[in-house]
Image: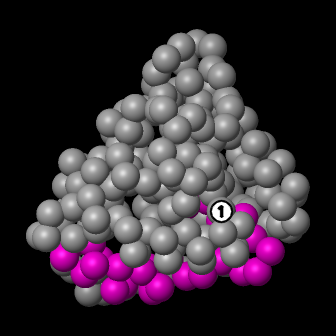
Amino acid sequence: MTFETLPASRHALTRDLTDLMWSTDPVLHRYMFGRRPTLNKVLDREWPGDHGLLSHAHAFSALAGMRQVGLLIGHTTSEYVENFDHSVTHQADALTAEEAAHLRSALLWMDRLFPAPLPESYYILEFAISPRARGTGLACRLLDLAETRARMQGCVRLSLDVAADNGAVGFYTHLGFRTEVETRLPALDEAHG
């Protein structure tokens, strides 16, 4: 299988991006968005724009032909703050009142669920590889692109969040990532797994 890794296009099919993101951590995305179609609505709104946590402007794609098989969305520390504020303000505009209320409720736990990255970090918010493309070196290629962008923007470290029971933890450890913070939220564990 041949892959092309490149800065993401604003014209990517958000349904494919939704499927890819959802497959990587369905528990987290269910908690944040409730249902897959809600995440797709948020992506429909944010992806084509230049601002927001889920904007193409902060992403790299991996394609096998025309099929999206990898995605990495990352932000410098300052970009993350600006884009988080933009997303909080505008994501709900694409949603029903019920979906928006669910998202606002999930955001109440955001600062505990995802501790702020250290200064001079490039924070990888979303990192997804299609199951059929895992083990091919594609993840390393996307991380290399992120590292290059991070250095160009003056960042001295990459950081990301991953659930402790996610199979990717071993991959990150193998690459030299180390645990900086461990967070356990009993209320979310009990309610959402």
- As drawn, is 40 to the left or to the right of 43? left
In the rendered view, would you say 29 is above or below 129? below
Q: Which residue is mark 1?
A: 75
Q: Which residues are magenta?
A: 101-127
Residue 126 seen from this side: no
Whether residue 90 is visible, yes or no, is: yes
Which quadrant: the C terminus? bottom left
Query: Which percent across, then down, holds residue 36?
Result: 24, 49
Question: Is the residue 136 above or below the residue 156 in the image?
Answer: above
Q: Residue at x 35, y 79 (%)?
A: 107
Q: Quadrant of residue 138?
A: top right
- Place of residue 164 in the rendered image (x, y in percent of width and height, measured from the top left): 48, 66
Rendered image quadrant of residue 8? top right
Coordinates of residue 90 in the picture (x, y in percent): 38, 68
Please tell me how many numbered marks the rendered image carries: 1
Mark 1 secondary-structure assignment: strand
